[in-house]
């Protein structure tokens, strides 16, 4: 591609409303443009990278036995009513009416559509299992779209759904999907962890998120530095009523004191502007400690707190406010009720860091979104434990490290959550009617693009890994007005293309400085510069990532860049 013809509108200035590196650089380098809040166009360079990610996803999904298909973005409300999500999904679901006043939703995800297809078409165990995927645009009216492609309102997702007659079959597919995801994110060059995630109302522990370790991540994860142990420190509001012995009261106090920070420090650590914040507050009341983990301004809609207090609000809450918060709609924060006698003494509240997580619904392991009774039976004091950075990992291997993560993928055993209400049934070996089990597996394709950009850049611009770069080689005619240089550049352009590389050729009549700056900004891995030594048949080859450069005779160029 000749750069003189490429639509690549670059910007010199950092766009004012772009607050993370990937967003700034993707805008500046002309990969994307914003059309509305959380809604973007992919310009040619961005589209090329997207395409490469999609192809990696395709290859690994196909390899793992999933079949590609395509479902509509426009979905009948009836389907969502059948599953119940029409009522529970909240304002994140984009809803609209057609000219006949019929309700529709723009697909936020496709469990309903796929389940309706499968229940109509698959009647026998002989046709199971099935694993189907699509790569498609999704719509979610996020409360706070931000960070460019990382949290959009229209974005690209790969979503897969599997259907099974037997639990072992679901287990097998789940493992296959987890492995495929690891292969995909490795090929994208990302530093990631598969972390145990909250199963919420659905329950079960087979729920993993793929997290790219990143300072701008909105999730907080805890992992072992020496094993595969990793968990999302979920941000669900959890209330644990600890009817504990004085021993564990002392323990609580000890941890609280060790961890106690001023609320500002706590906020600073978690970055108050981030949308997911948990605050833990330890209240002492009547000799009975009550630990309240508060999710700040979180977007998950199913959790509707009557008094949605921000983290800071809660930290500073008066007794009355805190009571109000505790007194939320029944069921909205789990089966928890707080007796009126629990006298909360606000000024004794010790702001207590989140990175201490409590509870375990499977002893030693699952320490997130633990709602007593719903997730585990708790005895007097045994189930309360705190994990802080540097602790021994629950699996006994290594110590716990905390990090922020960007959720790029999510695999989840759904069981019969959709198949039951939507009546996706099959006949088993004995001719008996049975409900199918399901799994679902999502990857944020456009979010992955941004995560790669976020983790691969320097102060000059983007640095693409070989697997995702929009072009392999950036050929630059340093001075296109110099006939000799222009002629050699033209020749090399053909040569590089014939060698099978995708080459971007900067043939523009621009100053060398401008060309180099643009080249650094868009970040192709290899740059070939045809300059002063063109007459001697020598060009300069520069590696974007390391900054190394080499003088290479034209005759050696092909073998050099291979
Ligand atoms: P988040 O916790 O970030 O809101 P989610 O858990 O709601 O994500 P899923 O329903 O698990 O998302 O969707 C599958 C994948 O789609 C996510 O793992 C993520 O990579 C991607 N994704 C979700 N929401 C967005 C969004 N608003 N913009 C871009 N990608 C998204
Ligand atoms: Mg979400
Ligand atoms: Mg999530
Ligand atoms: Mg998720």
Image: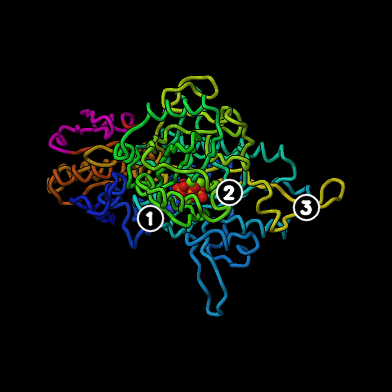
Compare residues 6 and 130 and report the one nearer the observer: 130
Looking at the image, residue 334 sits to the left or right of residue 352; the answer is: right
Residue 438 at x, y = what percent? 66, 47
Residue where numbered disc 3 is placed: 426
Could you tell me which residue is drawn at 60 percent across and 34 percent down?
361
- Verify CB contact (< 8 Å) between mark 2 and mark 1: no
Residue where numbered disc 1 is placed: 144
Q: CA distance from mark 3 to mark 2?
A: 20 Å
Estimate how packed mark 2 is, as few (under 14), some (14 to 19) or many (20 or more) residues with alpha carbons within 10 Å.
many
Q: Quadrant of the C terminus?
A: top left
Q: Is mark 1 within 8 Å of ligand 1?
A: no
Estimate how packed mark 3 is, as few (under 14), some (14 to 19) or many (20 or more) residues with alpha carbons within 10 Å.
many
Residue 36 at x, y = what percent? 34, 62
Residue 436 at x, y = what percent? 72, 49
Residue where numbered disc 2 is placed: 160
Q: Is residue 542 magenta?
A: yes
Span shown in magenta:
531-560
Could you tell me which residue is drawn at 46 percent across and 50 percent down?
323
Would residue 444 be visible to someone looking at this image?
Answer: no
């Amino acid at each position: 591609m000749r750069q003189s013809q490429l639509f690549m509108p670059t910007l010199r200035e950092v766009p004012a409303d772009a607050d993370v590196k990937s967003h700034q650089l993707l805008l500046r380098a002309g990969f994307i443009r914003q059309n509305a809040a959380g809604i973007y166009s992919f310009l040619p360079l961005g589209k090329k990278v997207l395409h490469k990610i999609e192809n990696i996803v395709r290859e690994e999904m196909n390899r793992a036995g999933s079949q590609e298909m395509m479902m509509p973005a426009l979905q009948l409300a009836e389907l969502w009513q059948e599953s119940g999500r029409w009522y529970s999904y909240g304002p994140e679901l984009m809803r609209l009416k057609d000219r006949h006043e019929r309700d529709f939703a723009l697909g936020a995800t496709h469990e309903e559509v796929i389940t309706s297809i499968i229940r109509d078409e698959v009647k026998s165990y002989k046709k199971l299992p099935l694993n189907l995927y699509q790569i498609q645009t999704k719509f979610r009216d996020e409360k706070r779209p931000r960070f460019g492609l990382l949290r959009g309102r229209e974005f690209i997702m790969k979503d897969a759904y599997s259907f099974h007659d037997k639990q072992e079959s679901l287990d097998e597919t789940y493992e296959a999907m987890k492995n495929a995801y690891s292969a995909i994110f490795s090929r994208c060059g990302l530093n990631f962890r598969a972390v145990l995630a909250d199963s919420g109302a659905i329950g079960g522990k087979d729920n993993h998120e793929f997290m790219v370790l990143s300072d701008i991540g909105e999730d907080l994860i805890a992992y072992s530095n020496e094993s595969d142990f990793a968990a999302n420190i979920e941000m669900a509001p959890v209330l644990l009523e600890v009817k504990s012995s004085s021993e564990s009261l002392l323990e609580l106090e000890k941890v609280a004191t060790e961890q106690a920070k001023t609320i500002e420090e706590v906020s600073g650590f978690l970055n108050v502007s981030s949308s997911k914040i948990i605050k833990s507050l330890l209240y002492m009341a009547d000799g009975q400690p009550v630990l309240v983990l508060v999710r700040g301004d979180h977007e998950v809609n199913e959790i509707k707190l009557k008094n949605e207090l921000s983290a800071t609000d809660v930290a500073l809450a008066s007794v009355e406010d805190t009571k109000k918060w505790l007194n939320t709609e029944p069921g909205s924060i789990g089966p928890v009720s707080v007796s009126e006698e629990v006298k909360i003494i606000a000024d004794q509240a010790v702001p207590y860091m989140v990175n201490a997580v409590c509870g375990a619904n499977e002893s030693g392991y699952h320490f997130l979104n633990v709602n007593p009774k719903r997730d585990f039976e708790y005895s007097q004091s045994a189930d309360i434990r705190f994990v802080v950075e540097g602790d021994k990992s629950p699996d006994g291997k290594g110590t716990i490290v905390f990090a922020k993560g960007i959720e790029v993928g999510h695999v989840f055993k759904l069981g019969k959550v959709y198949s039951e209400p939507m009546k996706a049934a099959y006949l088993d070996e004995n001719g008996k009617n049975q409900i199918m089990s399901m799994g679902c597996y999502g990857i944020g394709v456009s979010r992955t693009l941004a995560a790669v950009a976020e983790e691969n850049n320097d102060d000059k611009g983007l640095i693409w890994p070989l697997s995702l770069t929009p072009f392999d080689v950036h050929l630059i005619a340093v001075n296109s007005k110099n006939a000799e240089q222009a002629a050699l550049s033209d020749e090399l352009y053909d040569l590089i293309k014939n060698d099978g590389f995708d080459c971007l050729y900067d043939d523009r009549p621009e100053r060398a400085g401008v060309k180099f700056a643009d080249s650094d900004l868009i970040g192709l891995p290899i740059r070939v510069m045809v300059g002063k030594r063109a007459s001697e048949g020598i060009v300069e080859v520069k590696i974007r990532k390391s900054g190394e450069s080499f003088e290479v005779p034209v005759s050696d160029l092909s073998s050099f860049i291979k």
